[in-house]
Amino acid sequence: MRGVFTSLDAAQTEELGARLAARLRPGDVVLVAGELGAGKTTFVRGACRRLGVPGPVTSPTFTIGQRYPAAVPVGHVDLYRVASLADEDPDLLADYLGPDAIGFVEWPLGEEPTLAGLGRIVARVSLEHAGGGRRRVEVR
């Protein structure tokens, strides 16, 4: 799934996440960028539902990451509060990303080389406010 999409509401943003998730395999990592409130976690929530995550999917901003149980575990990382992974313990992301999980990383800016060492980066998603509650979602 590649392209530029317009989402009119949270349900459509979740559906775009679900469409991308249908193609993901263990070891895959999806980078999710966008300004505050653009719908990053909403997109990830839709993907998680498609991957079989039954419980709440919330932003891990204050905890760095969540690992959700599913047939293939799903890691959800938020690097908003991390200045640089170079300054962190190398095992910081080991619980969330790796060959046995599918991972989503919010706020990945500048950390792609490190993240690529933890899994296959298979998509880069960018979300932007497009006015009137709409979102522009680009999947590369």
Image (cartoon, grey):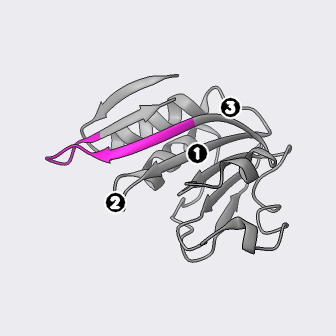
Tell me where the magenta segment starts and ends, as one range.
Answer: 124-135
Answer whether labels 3 and 1 touch (C-beta < 8 Å): no
Q: Nearer the viewer, mark 3 or mark 1?
A: 1
Relative to 6, is 77 above or below? Answer: below
Queried whether the magenta region covers residue 127, the answer comes back as yes
* Residue in view at x 49 percent, y 39 percent: 125
Q: Nearer the viewer, residue 119 or 102?
A: 119
Few, some or many residues within 10 Å of mark 1 (<14, 14–19, 20+): many
Residue hosting label 1: 31
Q: Nearer the viewer, residue 23 or 84?
A: 84
Q: Position of residue 42 (x, y in %)?
A: 43, 51
The disc label shown at residue 120, or none: none
The nearer-to-camera label among 1 and 2 is 1
Within 10 Å of disc 3 (Cα), the crowding (few <14, some 14-19, many 20+) is some
Q: Earlier in the sequence, mark 1 or mark 2?
A: 1
Residue named by callout 2: 37
Residue at screen point 75% across, 44% down: 116
Q: Quadrant of residue 4?
A: top left
Give the residue type that dot 2 points to. Answer: Gly
SS class, disc 3? loop
Labelled disc at residue 24: 3
CA distance for labels 1 and 2: 16 Å
| CA distance for labels 3 and 1 | 13 Å
Helix or strand or loop: what does disc 1 sit on?
strand
Q: Which amino acid does the dot numbered 1 rest on?
A: Leu
Seen as rendered, the residue at the extreme left is: 132
In the image, residue 26 above or below residue 104: above
Q: Give me the C-alpha separation between circle 2 and circle 3.
A: 25 Å
Q: Determine which quarter of the picture holds residue 93.
A: bottom right
Q: For the point 52% across and 35% down, which residue is it?
A: 18
